[in-house]
Image: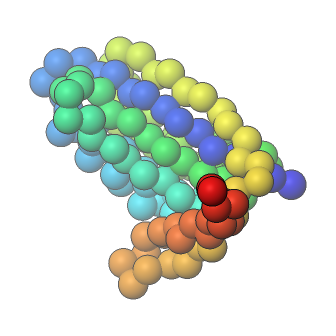
């Protein structure tokens, strides 16, 4: 099966950035620790959009994503941010043809090392 990625935009109520960010970072740590199929979970802070956060999530397959959405951590996160979120927009993406190697760093975070095929040289 191919890997499954999610790109998510979270828009929150004014003045609640620190609370929402902390809830997401805590959720992220739980997911990476407790969900074997969660390969990567990055929380990104846009420089030009102060009321939004972006997420990049990578799952080993659709079963791992289903386990994530039914898991304890996401329920806890939803309780933490109830009433603080304006909107959530997500894009589910297949990760076909991607070649990457995954390893756990000393901090418990995951990183990717892409393997690029060499392109034909131009004359």
In-image side of 54 versus 57 (left or right): left
In-image side of 62 versus 35 (left or right): right
Kindly give the residue lying farthest to the top in the view shown. Answer: 86
Kindly give the residue lying farthest to the bottom in the view shown. Answer: 106
- Nearest to the observer: residue 83 or residue 64: 64
Across and down, in percent, residue 24 comes to: 36, 45
Across and down, in percent, residue 86 comes to: 35, 15
Q: Is residue 95 visible?
A: yes
Question: In which quadrant of the rendered image does the N terminus lie?
Answer: bottom right
Residue found 55% across the figure and 27% down from its top: 90
- Total marks placed: 0
Q: Is residue 117 above or below residue 28?
A: below
Kindly give the residue lying farthest to the left in the view shown. Answer: 15
Q: Is residue 85 above or below residue 44?
A: above
Color theme of the render: rainbow
In-image side of 1 versus 7 (left or right): right
Across and down, in percent, residue 17 comes to: 20, 32
- Nearest to the observer: residue 51 or residue 86: 51
- Nearest to the observer: residue 104 or residue 34: 104
Question: In which quadrant of the rendered image does the C terminus lie?
Answer: bottom right
In-image side of 113 versus 78 (left or right): right
Residue found 17% across the figure and 18% down from its top: 14
Residue found 60% across the figure and 52% down from its top: 58
Q: Is residue 35 visible?
A: no
Kindly give the residue lying farthest to the front in the view shown. Answer: 123
Across and down, in percent, residue 47 comes to: 20, 35
């Amino acid at each position: 099966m191919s890997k499954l990625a999610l790109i998510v935009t979270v828009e929150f109520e004014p003045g609640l950035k620190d609370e929402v960010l902390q809830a997401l970072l805590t959720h992220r740590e739980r997911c990476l620790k407790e969900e074997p199929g969660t390969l990567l979970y990055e929380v990104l802070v846009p420089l030009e959009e102060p009321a939004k956060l972006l997420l990049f999530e990578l799952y080993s397959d659709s079963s791992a994503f289903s386990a994530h959405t039914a898991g304890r951590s996401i329920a806890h996160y939803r309780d933490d941010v109830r009433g603080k979120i304006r909107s959530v927009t997500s894009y589910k993406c297949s990760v076909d043809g991607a070649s990457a190697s995954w390893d756990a760093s000393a901090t418990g975070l995951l990183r990717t090392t892409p393997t690029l095929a060499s392109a034909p040289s131009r004359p």
